[in-house]
Image: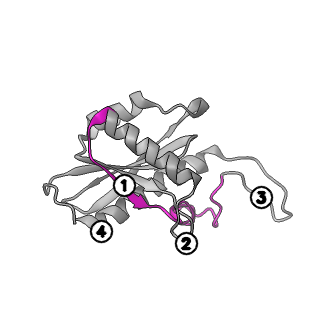
Amino acid sequence: MIDYPLNSTFLGFDYSQNKIGIAVGQRLTGTARGISTLKSPNKKINWPAIEELLQQWHPVALIVGLPLTMDGEEQETTETAKAFGNQLNQRYNLPIHYMDERLTSREASHILGYDGHTSPRRYSKAGKKVKKNKQQGHDIDRVAAELILQSWLNENT
């Protein structure tokens, strides 16, 4: 267990190169909730939007989802998530904690009623692609960040 004051606030991140789901959580209540999904046009992180959220919530630490294989091994995206965490630490000088994010997008999709689809690109019963629903993808990232942060709070508070 990591010792932070009872009134501590944390921000959680579900990082990908195209968008970042963000959640906020409190140690006092032990709960997290998704608050935003930031687009990353041309794979460029929207640092001003992240800074605005940091100023709004005043977190004591940041939690970054760590994508691992089902066997718990690191993969290519693990390194990009760690690089993002390192950038957060360098820019904002806040502690960074990593949390296993296996299956959080699938769980988020299930919570949102998207029938196990983790991609906003949906398929008809005949297997043909149907119109892409961008909002679903943003919802999934936001809820995945919530699940990541909630798991971390469950283990560490």
Magenta span: 91-119
Mark 2: secondary structure: loop
At label 3, the amino acid type is Tyr
**Residue 58 at x, y = what percent?**
23, 40
Instruction: Give the left or right position of residue 31, taking residue 128 as reference.
Output: left
At label 4, the amino acid type is Glu
Mark identifier at residue 71: 2
Marks 3,4: beta carbons within 8 A: no
At label 1, the amino acid type is Arg
Label 2 packing within 10 angstroms: few (<14), some (14-19), many (20+): few
Q: Is residue 101 magenta?
A: yes
* Mark sitting earlier along the chain (3/4): 3
* Mark sitting earlier along the chain (3/1): 1
Height in image: 46 above or below 111?
Answer: above
Height in image: 149 above or below 45?
Answer: below
Q: Nearer the viewer, mark 4 or mark 2?
A: 2
The image's colour scheme reads one colour
Q: Is residue 15 visible?
A: no
* Mark sitting earlier along the chain (1/2): 1
Viewer-nearest residue: 124 or 155 = 155
Quickly name the residue at label 3. Answer: 123
Height in image: 134 above or below 97?
Answer: above
* Mark sitting earlier along the chain (4/2): 2
Viewer-nearest residue: 70 or 33 = 70
At label 2, the amino acid type is Asp
Height in image: 41 above or below 148?
Answer: above
Quickly name the residue at label 4. Answer: 155
Alpha carbon distance from label 2 to label 3: 28 Å
Label 4 packing within 10 angstroms: few (<14), some (14-19), many (20+): few
Mark identifier at residue 33: 1
* Mark sitting earlier along the chain (1/4): 1
